[in-house]
Amino acid sequence: MSSDELGPSFRKFIDSTTAITLARFFMPLVVAVLGYFLSTTLSDLKFSNQQIWAQLGKMIDAQAVTNAAAAGVSAKVDAAVKQLDHLQGQVDSLPRR
């Protein structure tokens, strides 16, 4: 018997059985491969995120040190300006010739 003699209903059965077999055995493989790639991508993103936060923490620490140093310099400049103003007042009060 050829496939033409079996009729269209049997041909549909063969086609549907083939489709079910393919779906049953190959789709889990496809899903597993996609899951593997997605999970490795996710772990790479997590690792990159951790590195970014570590670098951001270092940058925040460096910024805090810089701000503290700038505040110290600013205080010293303010003190020097006050001393200069005081000295200028003393010089201005000296008798002129």
Image: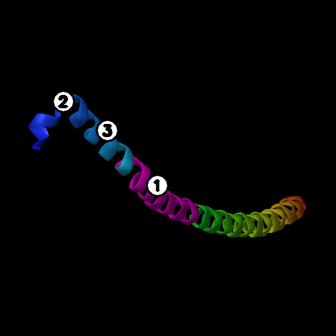
Nearest to N terminus: mark 1 or mark 3: 3
For the point 61% across and 62% down, the residue is: 46
Residue at mark 3:
16
Q: Tell me, yes or no, whether the highlighted magenta stretch contains residue 40.
A: yes
**What span is in magenta?**
22-45
Q: Principal SS element in the magenta part?
A: helix
Q: Nearer the viewer, residue 1 or 76?
A: 1
Quadrant assignment for the N terminus: top left
The residue sitting at the front extreme is: 1
Mark in front: 1 vs 3: 3
In the picture provided, is 92 more to the left or to the right than 16?
Answer: right
Give x and y (percent) for residue 60.
Answer: 71, 63
Nearer mark to the viewer, of 2 and 3: 2
Q: Secondary structure at mark 1?
A: helix
**Residue at numbered disc 2:** 8
**Label 2 residue SS:** helix
In this rendering, the answer to whether 15 lies above or below 90 is: above
| Residue 75 percent coordinates (x, y) | 84, 63
